[in-house]
């Protein structure tokens, strides 16, 4: 009887050696508020939530879930826009409005299929991939205004760079990094922290591929309401039709960064 | 006693333990179980609430001196480890089984009565501890490779061996 008890530690030792090589992962939760990864092959992550929508104008522009390219998984959103030569500008975006936190990180991955001519002529010719909107009166839905655009411009050397256009100033916001570049044919990550709580200091911070590029205080509009769009917005581009792929969009309570995970 | 590979190194945890040494003589088999109260720690900047329930089996070598009985144990341990991140927006408790080795050194003061006080130090060594992950950060790190502990209590000499019961805690 007593001798048999020696088998217990021996058996367990064998089990221990066998088990020692299989470290498990314990998933303890998430600080993600909302994500859109397009892995269902549809845009329902945007359209099924309150205040979420797909907006295209003119009708020749389109947004579709596509397996052509993907940052993570098998699908992304293919956002195509045909820009007119004169206002109103074209719009081909995935959008969320209202029902968003007073303070959150907004992020998405973008892939430019082609270059386009974008001068620094402000609204006469422009290209933007992310937009924040506000309300001048938070209780009045008719007071929505365009607020901040993450815009693409041509650098003096001819490459594409990122700018943050502030509509209330009608000028580009000061940059921490002068001309942060983006490359055609390569995924890049844009993330913004928007602190917009009533009664607190309002602030906007922008990162490109994890690098801080803009850090500004916010004064325009009423706090407490946010509109956020990603995709293609532009006017008078050459070529007139431009396509951007968008993937792995997130609204998060903490910074996602280029190395963040939206799923396991 | 609990700890992690990153974040605050150690957080003490209190609990209780029961052990049975089977047989007579200087070399015996031992079985033990312990349970710890939940404690707070942190990993990768995320606060974690965790509890642990280890079960171990091994062999005990006893050396009898005039006024004290020394004993050393070596064996294997399997522990249920539960982690919860209460500060996350969406907190999902997660439990894993970790397996490793255990060594212990103790001393018992024999007395005329059946009950004898003892003091023991032990360490659980987990070669491949589970990793802990949270979105969007990713993997926060691994739980501890080493779980040291100390216990004091009373042992009881039963006809078939010795039983030890004790509150248990880290320093």
Image (cartoon, helix red, strand yellow):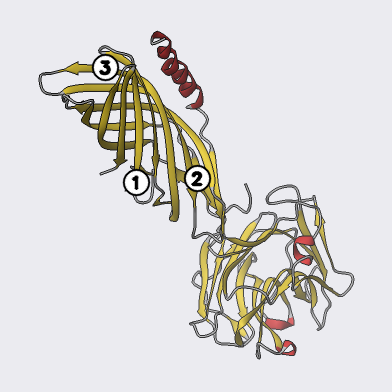
The reply to whether label 1 and label 2 mark residues of one chain is yes
The chain identifier of the residue carrying mark 2 reads B
Q: Which mark is residue A157?
A: none
Residue occupied by mark 2: B132
Mark 2 and mark 3, same subunit?
yes
Instruction: Using the image as rendered, state which of residue B140 and residue B23 is in the foreground.
Output: B23
Q: Earlier in the sequence, mark 2 or mark 3?
A: 3
Where does the image place residue A136, in percent across and percent down from the top left?
A: 65, 90
Q: Quadrant of residue B129?
A: top left
Which chain's residue wears label 3? B
Task: For mark 3, give the secondary structure.
Answer: strand
A171 left or right of B129 in image: right
Residue picked out by circle 3: B61
Vertical placement of residue B14 versus B68, above or below: below
Q: Quadrant of the N terminus of chain B?
A: top left
How crowded pointer 1 is (Cα within 10 Å; few <14, some 14-19, many 20+) is rated as many
Up the image or down, A194 lies above or below A22; here it is below
Q: Of tags 1 and 2, which is closer to the observer?
A: 1
């Amino acid at each position: 009887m007593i001798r048999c008890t020696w088998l217990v530690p021996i058996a367990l030792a064998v089990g221990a050696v066998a088990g020692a090589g299989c470290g498990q992962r314990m998933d303890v939760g998430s600080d993600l508020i909302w994500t859109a990864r397009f892995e269902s092959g549809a845009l329902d992550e945007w359209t099924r939530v309150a205040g979420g929508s797909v907006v295209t104008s003119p009708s020749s522009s389109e947004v579709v879930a596509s397996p052509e390219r993907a940052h993570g998984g098998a699908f992304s959103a293919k956002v195509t826009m045909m820009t007119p030569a004169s206002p109103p500008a074209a719009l081909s975006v995935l959008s969320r409005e209202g029902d968003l936190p007073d303070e959150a990180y907004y992020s998405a991955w973008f892939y430019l299929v082609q270059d386009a001519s974008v001068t620094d002529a402000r609204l006469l010719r422009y290209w933007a991939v992310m937009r924040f909107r506000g309300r001048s009166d938070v209780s009045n839905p008719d007071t929505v205004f365009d607020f901040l655009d993450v815009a693409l411009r041509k650098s003096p050397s001819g490459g594409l760079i990122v700018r943050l256009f502030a509509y209330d100033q009608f000028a580009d916001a000061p940059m921490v990094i002068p001309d942060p570049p983006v490359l055609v044919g390569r995924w890049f990550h844009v993330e913004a922290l928007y602190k917009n709580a009533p009664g607190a200091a309002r602030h906007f911070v922008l990162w490109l591929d994890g690098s801080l590029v803009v850090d500004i205080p916010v004064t325009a509009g009423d706090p407490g309401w946010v509109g956020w769009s990603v995709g293609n917005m532009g006017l008078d581009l050459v070529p007139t039709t431009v396509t951007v792929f968008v993937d792995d969009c997130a609204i998060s309570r903490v910074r996602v960064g280029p190395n963040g995970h939206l799923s396991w | 006693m609990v700890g992690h590979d990153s974040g605050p190194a150690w957080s003490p945890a209190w609990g209780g333990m029961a052990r049975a040494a089977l047989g007579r003589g200087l070399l015996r088999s031992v079985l033990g179980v312990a349970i710890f109260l939940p404690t707070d720690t942190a990993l990768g900047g995320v606060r974690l609430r965790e509890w642990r329930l280890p079960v171990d089996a091994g062999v005990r070598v006893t050396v009898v001196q005039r006024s004290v009985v020394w004993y050393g144990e070596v064996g294997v341990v399997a522990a249920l480890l539960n982690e919860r991140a209460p500060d996350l927006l969406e907190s999902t408790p997660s439990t894993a089984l970790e397996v490793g080795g255990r060594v212990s050194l103790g001393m018992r003061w024999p007395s005329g009565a059946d009950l004898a006080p003892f003091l023991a130090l032990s360490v659980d060594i987990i070669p491949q501890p589970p990793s802990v992950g949270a979105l969007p950060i990713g993997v926060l790190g691994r739980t501890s490779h080493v779980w040291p502990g100390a216990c004091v209590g009373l042992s009881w000499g039963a006809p078939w061996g010795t039983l030890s019961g004790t509150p248990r805690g880290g320093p």
